Image (cartoon, rainbow, N blue to C red):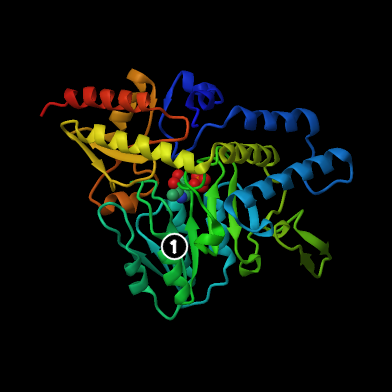
Amino acid sequence: MYDLSAIRKDFPLLEDFIYLDNAATTQTPLPAVKAMEEYLYKYAANYGRGAHRLARMTTDRYENTRETVASFLNSDVTGTIFTRNATESINMVAYGLQWHHGDHMIVPIVEHHSNLLPWLRLRDQGVEVTVVQVDEEGVVDPEHIELSITDRTRLVAVNHVTNVFGSIQDIRKMVQIAHENGCQVLIDASQSAGHMPLDMNKIGADFLVAPGHKGLLGPQGTGILCLRDPDSISPMYLGGGMVSSVSIGSYQIEASPARFEAGTPNIPGVIGLGRAVEYVRDIGVGNIEKHEATLAKKAASLLAEIPGVQVYGPKDRAGVVSFNVHGMNPHDVAIILDQTRKICVRSGYHCAMPAIKGVGLKGTVRASFALYNTIEEVEILAETVANIAELVDR
Ligand SMILES: Cc1ncc(COP(=O)(O)O)c(C=O)c1O
């Protein structure tokens, strides 16, 4: 049974706020906060660098998290890397692939800037970047990917779920098309990891990136990069913890995952992430998916009924609902929602300017849901938006 009131007890902030900005970052459950507190109070030491018992305990807990995350995403433990956020994970792939002048890659327009700018910058190295258009609901047509592939295409980088419209992409089809044409695929699972079942092996992705701080409920400053073949990219950072021998003339880099984790990592964050992923796993990601889809569907239909409100995106969406109140700036709507009912939503371009401008908008209000939101919260949102819409002089 999906015990929503028990879940909500693990997120005390929800007693005071209607938190609907989960696509930006989620709240972290108490068991994960306690795991971080335990590390900081009881055994804090550096990771992978000491023989003493605290260092060994820290290293064990950190590696336990790697196993937990790898098993949750069905990726190889050695190809599961901890990063600071999804942005860093994507940059590590963009940097780490050996690009040659004239190489080609494909990315849809409906991407967060994090899955766009690292690719556009490759143009400076002579890489051709094709930005594929999407339909008005933010859905990528796999055929458009296929039509854009050339004999120099090396990579397709695509989101699983858009942070703008909640559209779910047919990533299995896109991976199939890309692989048939000898291209690698990066899946940006920022809005799907922890929100719906995700299986790196089944999807067949070469690279899968996710933040730790969204659907996986970990703390900010955590991210994940899953690599099918850890030798397919070179490390972006060099330094301590990732080399087996160093002399002034040469150095020997460790195997993955150490190879990609130079420097002291976010140890408390990773340990908290591990406990958070266990929390999501125990509730069941399929149950979470169903719950969030119900909330999003209800929100979209209630909002669409309000005169002067337009809802964007497809009917079958993940837990993201973008809308506008005609005649009002999205930021003003967000401020009134906060000031009147402590409803926290995102407004503006959602770090996806080309996607939003591409459908002729100057921004939207975005309500995004997590496992702990309720139908009552959705109803309060709709009721408050209806009150706001009535303020507009039409
Ligand atoms: C689809 C998508 N990709 C990438 C990111 C960037 O994530 P992070 O802030 O963890 O780097 C986000 C964040 O909102 C996102 O929604």
Q: Position of residue 310 (x, y in %)?
A: 21, 39
192 vs 157, nearest the viewer: 192
Residue 126 showing in the rendered view: no
Residue found at the far front of this picture: 1
Q: Residue 268: name its quadrant.
A: top right
Q: Is residue 81 above or below residue 319?
A: below
For the C terminus, the quadrant is top left
Q: Is residue 245 above or below residue 83?
A: below
Name the residue at 58% across, 30% down. 29
Looking at the image, residue 300 sits to the left or right of residue 257; the answer is left
Looking at the image, residue 365 sits to the left or right of residue 197; the answer is left
Name the residue at 28% across, 37% down. 300
Q: Residues within 10 Å of mark 1 (few under 14, many from 20)?
A: some
Q: Position of residue 371 (x, y in %)?
A: 47, 34
Q: Position of residue 175 (x, y in %)?
A: 45, 66
Number of numbered discs on residues: 1
Report the amino acid beneath label 1. Arg
116 vs 149, nearest the viewer: 149
Badge 1 residue CB within 8 Å of ligand 1? no
Q: Position of residue 380 (x, y in %)?
A: 32, 23
Residue 89 showing in the rendered view: yes
Name the residue at 89% across, 46% down. 51
Name the residue at 68% across, 45% down. 65
Residue found at the far right of this picture: 52
Q: Is residue 393 above or below residue 147?
A: above
Residue wearing tag 1: 172
Q: Is residue 171 above or below residue 37?
A: below
Element carrying mark 1: helix
Q: Residue 30: name its quadrant.
A: top right
Looking at the image, residue 36 sits to the left or right of residue 26; the answer is right
Residue found at the far bottom of this picture: 151
